[in-house]
Image: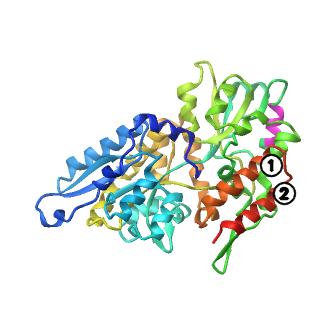
Amino acid sequence: MLPIRFRRLAAAAAIAVVGVGALAACGNGGDDEASAGPVKLRFLSLAWQKESLQANKDLVAKWNSEHPDIQVEYVQGDWNSVHDQLLTSFEGGDAPDIVHYEASSIGEFSKQGYLADLKDLIPADLKGQIDQGVWDTVTFDGQVTGVPFLLESQVVIANKKLLDAAGVTVPPADGGWTWDEFQANAQKLTKSGQYGVAWALKSPTNRVLNLALNYDGKFFYSDGGKTEVKIGDAEKEIPKRIHDMLYTSKTASPEALGMSGADTLPGFFGGKYAMLPGSVSLRQQMVEQAPKDFEWVTLPPVKGLSANQAANPQTLSVSADSKHKEQAAQFLSYFLNPTNMATLAKGDWLVPTGKQANEELVKLTEGKQGWDVAANSAADLTVAPFQQADGYPEWKTKYATPALQQYFANKITLDQLASQLVDGGKQVLR
């Protein structure tokens, strides 16, 4: 779940980019401590979808009405430019008090000392709502520098009519297929003019490393402070299974390899593909874009030795330079209480990290539109080794993505793929 998703690209047209000057204004000046009046906090939010935007703004307004002594100003950010803007504002000492981002991106800022350690500021009830494996994604050198609140799992969206016609039974929300069952059912769903699966692998690295946890595939191994890439049977399992579906059983569409999840939708709606493995947020496109008579269903994550996947939650952090860290933490606790977290997740079509928020979300939606599956998938999301590896972004871009694209295009062997991944690690890992 690490790359910027296709749906974020739409945000550039929907939301004006926040300039560096606007972010600079987010910092708390020295006048706050000396002047009378309420504590003032700036909250940089990256919400962009209509429902999510409204939920964020409504919660800030409600907080302000109930806490006249701590006032929060909502500042709109943009996923496509926030990293460079935050870096500039952190280096200039003018960062927002509260920052919305994601776990895979805050590590850099944490290690540079730009984010506050929240472990003694987060109330016990909020800590207890979130699994330790998810907290691990925001823990760097023993410091907890973000509160994880929204998760993105990998599920399977399927054409219900095609499943019924092939005699394929939809599994329960808490009991997904094994990989063997998934591949066997893809075979049942493959016929002339119809593939069982469309793997959208334009950006394959995160998908492969994410699903590799199904077989305990780590890819990144640390020993004595040094990290290296190792490729064994566990790491080869997912690439091999996808490759087999493309070229051995021929149950997966080769044309989908260069596509994003959104690119596959016309073919999916037209019956060319029966199943789409992808993000749980893909359900939003089903609701908004599917033809009126199109029946779709959300299938739970596929299981190997486990159903584990990498968690890359959206996060809320507090600037190390904020003069009001305790008040900022109070706002985070309010903003992320179970009811509010459920509302935020619904607006973004993602999974709340909190157990009670998950329960409330299922009740709120009656489990429809795949919300029951989404909620259950949270239990299997945990930190992955690649998320903690310095040099991972460069390895992914320069070596892993090109190598995986070649392998899935059947241009190199599995052993050659392994060699390229290992050699790339030697070039960039520290």
Most common secondary structure along the magenta stretch: helix
Task: Identify which amino acid the numbered label 2 is placed on.
Answer: Gln
Describe the element under mark 2 as helix, strand or loop. Answer: helix
Q: Which residues are magenta?
A: 183-189
Q: What percent of the width, then of the height, locates residue 297?
A: 63, 32
Describe the element under mark 1 as helix, strand or loop. Answer: helix
**Residue 185 falls within the magenta-colored stretch:** yes
Horizontal relation, residue 187 to residue 147: left or right:
right
Q: Residue at x 76, y 33 (%)?
A: 255
348 or 97: which is nearer to us?
97
Mark count? 2
Quadrant of the frame with the C terminus: bottom right
Horizontal relation, residue 47 to residue 303: left or right:
left
Kindly identify which residue carries mark 2: 416
**Disc ID at residue 407:** 1
Contact (CB < 8 A) between labels 2 and 1?
A: yes
Q: Earlier in the sequence, mark 2 or mark 1?
A: 1
Q: Residue at x 70, y 43 (%)?
A: 201
Q: What percent of the width, then of the height, locates residue 416?
A: 84, 57
136 or 221: which is nearer to us?
221
Task: Identify which amino acid the numbered label 1 is placed on.
Answer: Tyr
Horizontal relation, residue 280 to residue 56: left or right:
right
Residue at the top extreme, as displayed: 293
Within-10-Å neighbours for mark 2: few <14, some 14–19, many 20+: some
Q: What percent of the width, then of the height, locates residue 279?
A: 60, 42
Q: What percent of the width, then of the height, locates residue 153?
A: 59, 48
